[in-house]
Amino acid sequence: MKSIQNPVTVMLRSMILSCIIIIAAFSRVSAQDLKARPLQKLIDCPSAGGPEPRSFDFELRTFPPNGVLLGFNIGLFKRFALGVSYGGTDVIGYDAPLWNPQPGVSIAYRLIDESVALPGLAVGFNNQGYGRWDDDAGRYQYQPKGFYAVTGKNFLVWGLGEMGLHFGVNYNPTEASNPGVDLFAALNYLMTEQLGFIVEYSPALDDYHSDEAFGRGRGYMHAGVRWSFGQRFAIDLHFKDLLVNQKGSVRLGSRVGREIRISYIEHL
């Protein structure tokens, strides 16, 4: 007589088999993968990197309060990338979701590829802000970059990994309450193929002087840790506003903000 298996045992075996299939799928990768290309995005700041031609990447970001942001970028040509994103707050929970008023659009063009002698240089536009949307102020908690130009260069650190330096300038015309020019700089350090660190800073010159500004003049500093799995899949943990620049009424709390970002890249 055929024995009847315990449902719990069947479920556990199915989960183990699924995990093995997923790990095997992520293990079969090519050389042009997540760790092999320049970083396209740091935390909130863009970089001079971008998707490889005929490749796309998917991003899922969770942020307080119960927010979710989905993003999709595609490398259409050798130097040109296009992306869209959309999300909102209270997506996870019992309250009705508060969706962003419009989707985010990003366009990037790499003018100069990085070489031994020259840094990379890219220009672009991105109207996707981060954090929650404030209906009263008509802006995101962290404003989008708008039009920007950014340069970056990677260096080997005496056999201890790879470090990248990034510098940029941007002008945000998308939020009428605080238009203006701003700067940003970032450093990323790839300790191993799986583990990396990111720190970025912006003085937030466009989010300080007006009455509608959210900042106190200290600028925004964010930090992140990145784990890469199977070269195409990565998880980032972000720590937002380390200098406690935002006013208490905006932060909705006294602690440093925390976000999780999941990224996946694939080739067409």
Image: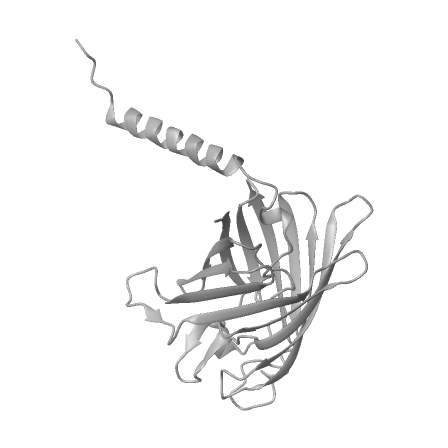
Compared with 180, 260 (above or below) is: above
Outermost residue on the top side: it is: 1
Position of residue 63 measured from the top left corner of the image (x, y, whole percent): 46, 62
Q: Is residue 19 left or right of residue 119?
A: left
Q: Is residue 250 left or right of residue 210?
A: left
Check the picture and name the quadrant holding the N terminus.
Answer: top left
Position of residue 155 measured from the top left corner of the image (x, y, whole percent): 77, 54
Q: Nearer the viewer, residue 242 or 265?
A: 265
Compared with 214, 124 (above or below) is: above
Position of residue 159 measured from the top left corner of the image (x, y, whole percent): 80, 43
Compared with 49, 147 (above or below) is: below
Q: Nearer the viewer, residue 30 or 1?
A: 30
Q: Nearer the viewer, residue 195 or 36?
A: 36
Q: Nearer the viewer, residue 118 or 66?
A: 118
> What residue sits 39% from the left and 75% below the top?
102
> What residue sits 60% from the left and 83% below the top?
206
Give residue 255's quadrant in the image: bottom right
> What residue sits 53% from the left and 70% below the top?
107
Position of residue 168 measured from the top left corner of the image (x, y, whole percent): 68, 72
Outermost residue on the front side: it is: 77
